[in-house]
């Protein structure tokens, strides 16, 4: 279970352009479910996703991972939690151009200090899961959008995370590739991965993948979208 309690996030606090992205959000995320955060751009779902995944800290409120409050842990501890617990799939893929697909997949594991040979072997096996082994030595700029998405998913899995977090994963994919992405998520769900998605795409939130839909607007949970 990941729980937020009265979480707020304010950007540019005290300035004329102050923006309250989250406003006292309390929600429980059951890690046995696939949870989809639904809402328009600016609703706060990406901000909440980042805080739940230890990528950012709230301005106020508390976050619990299991029975442990992680809100005020030092950054080195949060980094360890991110490495061991979460795999991230970003809207823009965030793959590094100029290096190969294989190298991109391996990068999140470098801070763990794992030896190169077993890490490379696992990265190749992960690429093979997505029929991308033949592209392992291809540079990212040589890949199609669908191939880049598969590499991004392989990268998210390299540290064997318990939880997959995906932010607007279909935003830059056409309909065919969006449905392909959803099939990959179904496979990961069947393998026991917890999945939290943020999306305003009906291909995502109207699918049968989600066990729970949490709707957001203006930094708040929509009434009836429920919580704790």
Image (cartoon, rainbow, N blue to C red):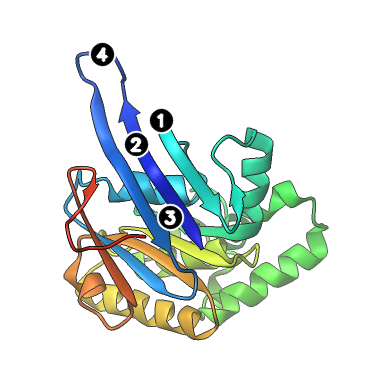
Which callout, 2 or 3, points to the residue nearer the camera? Answer: 2
Q: In terms of sequence position, does the residue under pointer 1 or pointer 4 come before the other?
A: 4
Asked whether 31 or 180 is in front, the reply is 31
Depicted 48 relative to depicted 58: above or below: below
For the residues labelled 2 and 1, the Cα–Cα distance comes to 6 Å
Q: In terms of sequence position, does the residue under pointer 3 or pointer 1 come before the other?
A: 1
Mark sitting on residue 59? 1
Depicted 158 relative to depicted 42: above or below: below
Q: In terms of sequence position, does the residue under pointer 3 or pointer 4 come before the other?
A: 4
Figure quadrant of residue 169 = bottom left
Which callout, 3 or 4, points to the residue nearer the camera? Answer: 4
For the residues labelled 3 and 1, the Cα–Cα distance comes to 38 Å
Query: What SS does tag 1 mark?
Result: loop
Depicted 163 relative to depicted 17: above or below: below
Mark sitting on residue 15? 4
For the residues labelled 3 and 4, the Cα–Cα distance comes to 40 Å
Query: In the image, residue 211 lies at what x, y percent?
Result: 34, 77
For the residues labelled 1 and 4, the Cα–Cα distance comes to 15 Å
Asked whether 16 or 114 is in front, the reply is 16
Tag 4–tag 2 contact (CB < 8 Å): no
Query: What SS does tag 4 mark?
Result: loop
Task: Give the left or right position of residue 211, taking residue 4 as reference.
Answer: left
Q: In terms of sequence position, does the residue under pointer 2 or pointer 1 come before the other?
A: 2
Mark 4 Cα shell of 10 Å, populated few (<14), some (14-19), many (≥20): few
Depicted 191 relative to depicted 109: above or below: below
Q: Which residue is mark 3?
A: 141
Query: In the image, residue 221 lies at what x, y percent?
Result: 23, 53
For the residues labelled 4 and 2, the Cα–Cα distance comes to 17 Å
Task: Give the left or right position of residue 190, taking residue 44 as reference.
Answer: right
């Amino acid at each position: 279970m990941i729980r937020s309690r009265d979480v707020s996030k304010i950007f540019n606090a005290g300035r004329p352009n102050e923006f309250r992205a989250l406003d006292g959000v309390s929600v429980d995320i059951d890690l046995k479910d696939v949870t989809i955060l639904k809402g328009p751009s600016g609703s706060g779902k990406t901000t909440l996703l980042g805080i739940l995944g230890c990528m950012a800290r709230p301005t106020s409120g508390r976050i619990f991972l299991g029975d442990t409050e992680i809100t005020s842990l030092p950054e080195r501890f949060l980094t360890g939690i991110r490495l061991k617990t979460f795999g991230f799939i970003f809207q823009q893929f965030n793959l590094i151009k100029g290096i190969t697909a294989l190298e991109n997949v391996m990068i999140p594991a470098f801070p763990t200090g794992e030896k190169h040979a077993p890490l490379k072997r696992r990265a190749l096996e992960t690429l093979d899961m997505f029929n991308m082994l033949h592209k392992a030595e291809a540079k990212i700029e040589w890949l199609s959008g669908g191939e880049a998405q598969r590499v991004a998913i392989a990268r998210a899995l390299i540290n064997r995370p318990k939880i997959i977090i995906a932010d607007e994963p279909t935003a830059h994919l056409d309909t065919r590739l969006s449905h392909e992405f959803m099939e990959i998520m179904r496979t990961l769900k069947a393998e026991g991965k917890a999945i939290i998605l943020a999306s305003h795409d009906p291909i995502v939130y109207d699918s049968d993948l989600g066990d729970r839909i949490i709707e957001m607007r203006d930094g708040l949970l929509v009434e009836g979208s429920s919580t704790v």
